[in-house]
Image (spheres, helix red, strand yellow):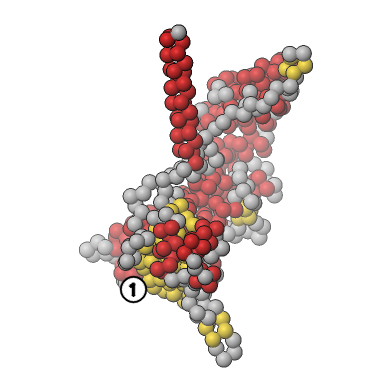
Amino acid sequence: MRRVKDGRRGIAVTTGILALQIVALQGAWTLTDRPLVLVAQTRTPLVHTEQEQYDPNIDLTHHLMRYLKELRKVEVMVYHPQHPAVQQFAAEKGLEPKMLESPDVALLLQIGRALKAAYVLVVRCTRSKESQLLEYEVQLWHPGRRTPLWQTAGNQQARAHDSLETALQSLTRTITLQLDTEIWSHLPSSPTSLPLQREKRASEPTDGGRTTLSLDTLIGEGRWNEALLLLRAAVNQNPLDATLRLRLIELYRRLGLQNVALDECERAMRLMPQSEPLVLMWAELMREQGKVADAIRTLQEMLQAKGGQTLALLLFDLQLMSGDFAGAEATFATMRPTNAPEVHWRAYLLQGVKRQFTMSQEPTQLTRERLPALLFVASGVMNDLANELLDLKRLAIDPAPDWKSLRERGEKIVIQSLDFGAWLGQLQPDDSTRDACAHLQFGAHLMGQAAQQMARYLLFRKVEDLENATLLRAEALRELEAATRLSEPNP
């Protein structure tokens, strides 16, 4: 009897430990250690003139929230008087609603402490009606402290060809960069999402004890091993069905059987050599396994033997992404002259590779499938421009710089960066690429500004121009990083 009781006690203890572990794991997926930042904007009164009154305040919170979130170091909450947490605080303190409409810094710090915010970021930005001059002031507070932890203030003149939106993006990006480097450099960046995967299991309808679920249902429920048996049998019955073969290959990939998937794909290609989807799948599998050189060599042999636009396009893509730009250009030369969108896209990429940015009357469509190749080419251009600016800075601080030569180089970089920005401006993104494209285009715009500031420094030798060029260059590369991050598949 004692043994039975001890056994039950052991089971109970083990069950309790497992329960605690499950709770702990659930908490790990739902909680975050990132500090909370409450962002609030103070406002100046309306300006009255003889003709009318206008609001000089410009809202920075939208752009700040976007860039702060991209740091992945802090949680961000924008102050709003109707926020439930703010309303609860006001009720507990007996505050009138009017006080929440335009709270001062002291009240914002009290609200921040009540929300358990680690920081309160207070911003102000105004613009006169007649000019594009933005005046701003930013303070970062710790709730409970009497003085700001960090602050900055100044003005920014929007250039004549820039929109107000562009000027606000540049200003808030600069503020975020300064906060990251001067205050939050010690904070780690967290992953964009939690790689938690759960296998779904649905109820199994049966007929006399036999499973009657379809292949789609099995795959949808994550029952891949059962689906594999069913699919393998279907392929054996229909060996020349390319669709079934592709589904089988994809299922092998999901199961992590990359070598088996490649073998199956090559076997199917021998049976159906004219199937373009099989060739595309084969090339993707070869790329995944690091066999790009072998894939290029095989595609070249296939192209020489039977030709074909699809093979040429596929070969071009592999050569481009492997850095064989000369080979990609040679392959492009073999393509039939056509206005087909896929050929036009490769011509567009070659312009970026050769740094020969030509303007077209027609927009260039940017899809999710095209984004990696664009980022590969555009990042090469951006990093080359950034390195050129860095080289100019190094040469300019030498004991005896050749100012004439440096100015000529600076002017070339300005022209190239502006042409690059206009080249990216031809892109027409879809919904899946809109954010990444916006970051990339804005990064090119900032790199153009950095080049212009460097050219000004080489001409007038003002230290502030060199500092602006350095900061804008860093911001441009941050935008490139953001675009690249958005192009990555979600875990």
**Label 1, on which residue?**
460
User: Relative to residue 233, is residue 475 drawn left or right?
Assistant: left
Tell me, yes or no, if residue 221 can be seen here: yes
Q: Looking at the picture, which amino acid does disc 1 mark?
A: Phe
The residue drawn where x is 71% and y is 27% is 216
* Residue 273 at x, y percent in the picture: 68, 24
Q: Compared to 233, does 489 lie above or below?
A: below
The residue drawn where x is 48% and y is 74% is 43
Q: Residue furthest bottom?
A: 50
Q: Compared to 309, does 247 lie above or below?
A: above
* Residue 342 at x, y percent in the picture: 66, 45
241 or 397, which lies in front? 241
* Residue 345 at x, y percent in the picture: 62, 48
Q: Badge 1: how crowded within 10 Å, few (<14), some, or many (20+)?
A: few
The residue drawn where x is 48% and y is 30% is 22
22 or 217, which lies in front? 22
The residue drawn where x is 48% and y is 28% is 19
User: Relative to residue 274, is residue 196 drawn left or right?
Assistant: left
